[in-house]
Image (tube, helix red, strand yellow):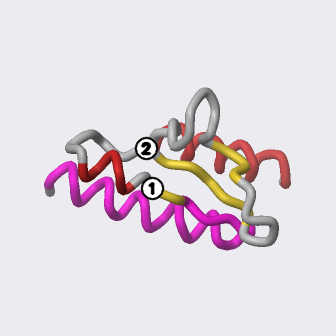
Amino acid sequence: MSRKELDNSRMRRMKRAAARRGLTILTSEKAKVLGQPGGHAVRDDESFKIVYGDEPKPFSATLDDIESWLDRLDDESS
């Protein structure tokens, strides 16, 4: 199994976890077009505000960052 397949399945799993909390994971398509790895951000579906991944610059979160952030949210709610 290639790394790309692992990242795709991981992203789908994180998107489902985020959706249960009313969040959407966004990916910077512009960075992908330029041949750079696309960064990510998390948006609140109700207010449409970015709640994670916009500091120090927009779409600065990696998949690892978002996964650990979602895990912390789960730990706080338990």
Position of residue 27 relative to residue 72, above or below, is: below
Please tell me whether mark 1 sits on a helix, a strand or a loop. Answer: strand
- Percent position (x, y) of residue 56? 61, 27
Position of residue 59 relative to residue 17, above or below, is: above
Q: Main secondary structure of the magenta part?
A: helix
In this view, the residue farthest toward the right is 77
Residue 19 covered by magenta stretch: yes
Query: Which of the two residues, 57 or 67, is positioned nearer the viewer here?
Result: 57
**For residue 2, side relative to residue 57 (left or right):** left
Kindly identify the amino acid type of the residue bearing the numbered disc 2.
Answer: Gly
**For residue 12, side relative to residue 14 (left or right):** left
> Which label was assigned to residue 39?
2
Query: Which of the two residues, 62 or 75, is positioned nearer the viewer here?
Result: 62
Which residue is drawn at the image coordinates 74% and 53% (left, top)? 74
The mark that comes first in sequence, 1 or 2, is: 1
**Crowding at label 2, few (<14), some or many (≥20) Cα neighbours within 10 Å?**
many
Task: Determine which residue is flagged by label 1.
Answer: 27
- Residue range corresponding to the magenta coloring: 2-25
Query: Which of the two residues, 16 or 57, is positioned nearer the viewer here?
Result: 57
**For residue 19, side relative to residue 48 (left or right):** left
Which residue is drawn at the image coordinates 35% and 64% (left, top)? 9
Position of residue 40 relative to residue 43, above or below, is: above
Q: Quadrant of residue 25?
A: bottom right
**For residue 27, side relative to residue 20 (left or right):** left
Please tell me whether mark 2 sits on a helix, a strand or a loop. Answer: loop
- Percent position (x, y) of residue 45? 72, 70
* Mark 1–mark 2 CB contact (< 8 Å): yes
Kindly identify the amino acid type of the residue bearing the numbered disc 1.
Answer: Thr
- Give me the C-alpha separation between circle 1 and circle 2: 6 Å
Q: Quadrant of residue 16?
A: bottom right
Which residue is drawn at the image coordinates 14% and 57% (left, top)? 1
**Crowding at label 1, few (<14), some or many (≥20) Cα neighbours within 10 Å?**
some
